[in-house]
Each structure stands twice: as C-alpha cells, then as structure tokens.
Image: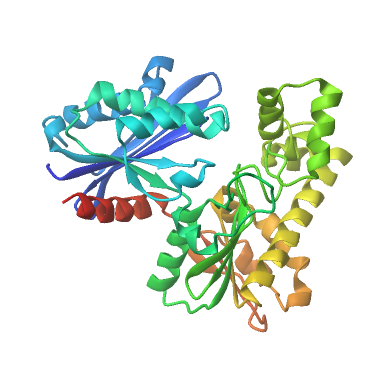
Amino acid sequence: MDNIIILSNPGSASKKYSVFQNDTEVCWFHFEKQSTEYVCSYKILNTFEKIPVSDAQYVEALIFVINLLQTKGVIKNNTDIKSISIRTVIPDNDFVNDSFLTKDIAKYLKTLLAYDPLHIAPVLGEIEVIKKSVSEDIPVCLISDSSFHISAKRVLPVGMDHNVYTIGYHGLSCESVLSILENEQIKHSKLIVCHLGGGSSISAIRSGKSVYNSMDYSPLGGTFMSSRSGSIDPFLILYIMKEKKMTYEETLMFLYTQSGLKALSKVSDDLRVVREEAFKGNQHAKQAIMQFVDSIASYICKATSYTEGVDTLVFTGTIGFRASYIREMVTSKLQWLGITINHDKNLDDIDTCFEISAFDSKIKVYVIQIDEMKEMHRHTKELLKIKI
C-alpha cells in the first residue's frame, strides 16, 4: 500500500496509533501496561492480535508499528508513508493551531517541557523516535487538541506583560461528537459536551462553534479529575507549596498526579476501584464520587451560561461512555433544567451513539463513543493540502 498516513496519540500511560490509506483506517495499535508488563493490541486489515512487548519496544512503539506494518505487507518501506501526525496537548498559545514540525518548533518545545512534562514529554519522545525511524522528507504534523476552541478564546485576568489567552482541550473529541451527530442527523444548536475520563472537560458549543471549555489554559483546569486537582483556589496552591516545602516542579506533579479522586477517596485514581470501595462502605470513596458528580454538574451549568440555554447534552470519554451510574447521578442534579432520562436506555451501551433522554425531557441527552483518530486524519489532510 502507498499513500499511508500514520496517526500517533502518545500519552503518559498508553500509546495509540492509527494507519489510514486514503480515507480508510486499515490498522490500529494500542500499547498499554497491564499488571507488570506492556501489551500491544492491534488490528491489521482483518487480523486482530494481542501480544506482550518489552519496555524498550514500548518506548519506541512507533518503530515497532512500522516494522510490523512491513512484516504484514501493509507497506514495503518507509517511502510508502505519506506523513506522520502527532496529537499535541500543549499549554502554550503558540500551539493552538495545527503545524508542521520543524527544527525550530522542536527546539521551542523542549523549552516548554518544565511547564507541563506530563503532556509535552510524550510528544518530544515521539519526535525523537520519528527522527530515528523515517526519512526527513516525510512531513510530520503536530495536530493540536486545542484548535477547535480558538473561537472561544478569551483574555485571562492576569497582569502579565503580554495577554494570556484561554486555550481549551478535548477539541478533537468535540469535533468527533459534532461529526457523529451530523451523521446521525441529530439537530442541535446549543450543545454541551461532557468529556469524562482520566482528563475531563466540559465544552459549550453554539451553532457548531466552541464558546467555552472548562480547561481554560491548561489540562489541569476545570472539573477535578482522576488524579488532577482541577480549578482550585489559587491561594491553596501557594499554601501547598509553603506547607509541603515543594518546588514549582514538585507542586505541578502533585496537582497533576496526587489530587482529584485519588486525594479525596484516599484509595485510587481509578473510578472503578473507588466505586468498589464505596460499595464496601468506604466513606471517603462515597464522598469522592459525590464531589466528582457535583463538580461535573456545576461546570455543565457554567457552560450553559455560554450557550444561553441547552438543547442537547452529550456524554463521552471513557467514563462518560461507560459509567452509566455517573450519567444517572449527574443528570439527576440537572432536572431543574428540564433533563429527565430513560433509566433502561441509560444502561444500554451496545451502540456507539444512543439516546438516553426520556420522551418528556426538554433536553436531548446522548452517549457517544468518539473517534479522535478520524478527526486527526481530517486535520492532517487539510494541513497537507497547504504544503502541496
């Protein structure tokens, strides 16, 4: 095959890849740690397999993917690869647009590493692997997870020498939701998207345009998450630094990895584990879930002020799609908006897009399994047209 585009979504705990030929996804790969070893689940054409991989293979997962593509006859050599794209989550106003990777951009990214190593380090790691594995002639695209939210840009109220603007994230998720709603011919004009997962955000979309995302400047903001603090009183951050005698770097990682559900439940950052503990009577776990739901509901209300009402509410992300009880608890707090759900439909997750609102609900409520890779592919094609 030729005209191959490889899409990379590197994270701190997993790596995902999609391989497109023209407009068709022909392969996908998912690397993650299970128990004590890394595994790679992949589908190449019509073959699905799950195999163990070493730590070194995980670090250079892209090389593993390319070698496997050659072994399986998907590509003959690297010249069959038209481009490689990397999903980027970068709290910097210079990275809100898609762009081609250059030496200057790679150099600038390294200077930003200390600001958000959790999201920037995986991107830099992928760039290093690309340098080793493919020709310099193959264009590398940086696909911003923030570009969708450019229309919602606002100046933040901080007295810097230059304006600092909101950025917003989960833009690819929002675009996927819009694409699926269009395919399903579901009308909407005032849409709220709840992307709930390890990272969670609430987006307000009016007539297809973003007007608000709860992650104002960084992926640390907004509703609290699995292990992230979300938006908290800024004085509390100063208090933590002073009380724990933490450096900037230590405080950043504390807010990213030791907060949220993990801090409140005192047991885990995994909602499934927290729920099990809650069933056993663990009061910390119960309180953590209640506050998680309160946080989500309050940001939905805030988002509604930006759309000036709401006609459609969508749950997506790993938690949003899978955790029916979270959807139940959140919507129960929004009944004053006119939301009522069908409890039987809410338990039905056999489709990638299904409605859970009751027949008399004033607001339509849907559960959607997004396809961010498909949106990345669309962004890549648009960027390549500029280069051509």
Farthest front residue in view? 161
Decide: is 260 above or below 60.
Answer: below
* Looking at the image, residue 245 lies above or below residue 127: above
Give the position of the N terminus as an image quadrant. top left
Q: Residue at x 52, y 42 (%)?
A: 92
Measured as percent of width and height from the top left, residue 50 is found at 38, 31
Instruction: Using the image, determine if residue 339 lies above or below residue 257.
Output: below
Q: Is residue 26 above or below residue 343?
A: above
x and y percent of residue 277 in the render?
79, 37
Question: In the displayed structure, does residue 207 sit left or right of residue 84?
Answer: right
Q: Is residue 153 at all visible to an observer of this figure? A: yes
- Identify which residue, 161 or 221, lies in the foreground: 161
Q: Quadrant of residue 175?
A: bottom left
| Residue 51 percent location from the top left of the image | 37, 26
Q: Position of residue 239 (x, y in %)?
A: 85, 32
Disc tally is: 0
Res 357 visible = no
Which colour scheme appears in the figure? rainbow
- Residue at point 61% right, 44% down? 161
Query: Which residue is depicted at the point 69% across and 42% down?
Result: 271
* 269 left or right, relative to 44: right
